[in-house]
Image (tube, rainbow, N blue to C red):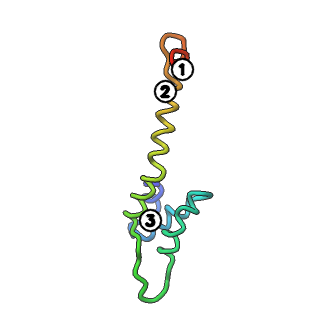
Amino acid sequence: MRLLINTKELTDTDDILKEWLGHLTGSALAWATPFLDDVLDATPAYVRRFTLADFLMAFNRTYAFKNIQDNCRRQIHELKQGTKPVTTYIQ
């Protein structure tokens, strides 16, 4: 996302948040609905509830930890001692 944002030369935090939200699909998009509704609300005198920093912190709490777990699990399954996988020794 950083590369995309830099390529598009986005500097406004609302534009960056919209870019992030525009790439979400499925359950991630459903999860982000409050952020999307907030950034798109054009009601006069509307006070925003969320910032880009709020979104990124919530996104990392929700999705980054899962990625860390998945990566660690994959690394454990790929470990070998000699020619045998570590899972053989676990059993």
Whole-angstrom CA distance, mark 1 to mark 3, is 43 Å
Name which of mark 1 and mark 3 comes first in the sequence.
3
Report which quarter residue 13 is drawn in: bottom left
Q: Is residue 78 above or below residue 43?
A: above
Q: Amino acid at mark 1?
A: Thr
Q: Nearer the viewer, mark 2 or mark 3?
A: 2
Question: Can residue 3 be spotted in the picture?
Answer: no
| SS type, badge 1 | helix
Residue 54 lies left or right of residue 80; in this view the side is: left
Q: Which residue is mark 3?
A: 16
Could you say where residue 71 lies in the image, as x and y percent from the top left? 49, 36
Q: Residue at x 41, y 70 (%)?
A: 50
Report which quarter residue 33 is drawn in: bottom right
| SS type, badge 3 | helix
Q: Is residue 45 above or below residue 19?
A: below
Q: Residue at x 49, y 67 (%)?
A: 18
Could you say where residue 20 lies in the image, as x and y percent from the top left? 49, 61
Q: Nearer the viewer, residue 15 or 60?
A: 60
Q: Residue at x 45, y 66 (%)?
A: 17
Q: Which residue is mark 2?
A: 76
Q: Which mark is on residue 87?
A: 1
Could you say where residue 42 lies in the image, as x and y percent from the top left? 49, 83
Name which of mark 1 and mark 2 comes first in the sequence.
2
Q: Amino acid at mark 2?
A: Ile
| SS type, badge 2 | helix
Q: Nearer the viewer, residue 38 or 17?
A: 38
